[in-house]
């Protein structure tokens, strides 16, 4: 099921926002290159909100301990994190961001 999140223009380039779908917190990231990604908003190391972190090219860095994650895969790229975070499929349609979410 695709869920509309917001317009692409609602997120500044190089920034992230936090959204909740049900009980799930998700970081929606727009890179300076204008790519949009969605990851679980909880750092796998310290349960810190990734949407409050630093976006750099195709990575997001947790502001608390510096762990970096790939926006493309959710993979942990640097310590102290070693576990990946979940990644969600992003669909852009007519300037709007949708996430493909499994309906339970």
Image: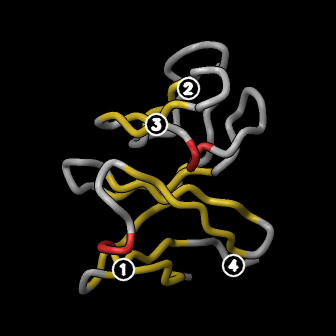
Secondary structure category for the residue under label 4 = loop
Residue where numbered disc 4 is placed: 103
Secondary structure category for the residue under label 1 = strand
In the rendered structure, the answer to whether residue 27 lies left or right of residue 43 reads left
Q: Nearer the viewer, mark 2 or mark 4?
A: 2
Residue plotted at (24% across, 86% down) = 94
Q: Earlier in the sequence, mark 2 or mark 4?
A: 2
- Residue 48 on image: x %, y %: 72, 39
Distance between the alpha carbons at the discs numbered 2 and 4: 27 Å
Residue where numbered disc 2 is placed: 76
Q: Is residue 90 above or below residue 80?
A: below
Secondary structure category for the residue under label 3 = strand
- Residue 51 on image: x %, y %: 56, 49
Task: Categorize mark 1 by other alpha carbons within 10 Å: few (<14), some (14-19), many (20+).
Answer: some
Q: Are the residues flagged by discs 3 and 1 in contact, CB closer than 8 Å?
A: no
Specify how the rendered protein is coloured: secondary structure
Secondary structure category for the residue under label 2 = loop
Residue where numbered disc 1 is placed: 7
In the rendered structure, the answer to whether residue 97 lies left or right of residue 100 reads left
The foreground one among 15 and 73 is: 15
Q: Earlier in the sequence, mark 4 or mark 3?
A: 3
Task: Categorize mark 3 by other alpha carbons within 10 Å: few (<14), some (14-19), many (20+).
Answer: some
Q: Nearer the viewer, mark 2 or mark 3?
A: 3
The foreground one among 8 and 85 is: 8
Task: Categorize mark 4 by other alpha carbons within 10 Å: few (<14), some (14-19), many (20+).
Answer: few
Q: What is the quadrant of residue 50 in the picture?
A: top right
Q: Are the residues flagged by discs 4 and 3 in contact, CB closer than 8 Å?
A: no
């Amino acid at each position: 099921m695709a869920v509309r999140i917001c317009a692409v223009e609602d997120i500044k380039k190089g920034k992230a926002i936090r959204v909740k779908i049900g009980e799930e917190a998700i970081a929606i990231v727009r890179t300076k290159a204008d790519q949009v990604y969605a990851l679980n908003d909880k750092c796998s190391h310290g349960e810190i909100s990734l949407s409050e972190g630093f976006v750099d090219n195709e990575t997001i860095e947790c502001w608390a301990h510096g762990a970096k994650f790939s926006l493309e895969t959710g993979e942990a790229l640097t310590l102290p994190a070693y576990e990946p975070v979940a990644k969600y499929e992003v669909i852009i349609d007519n300037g709007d961001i949708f996430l493909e979410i499994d309906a339970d």
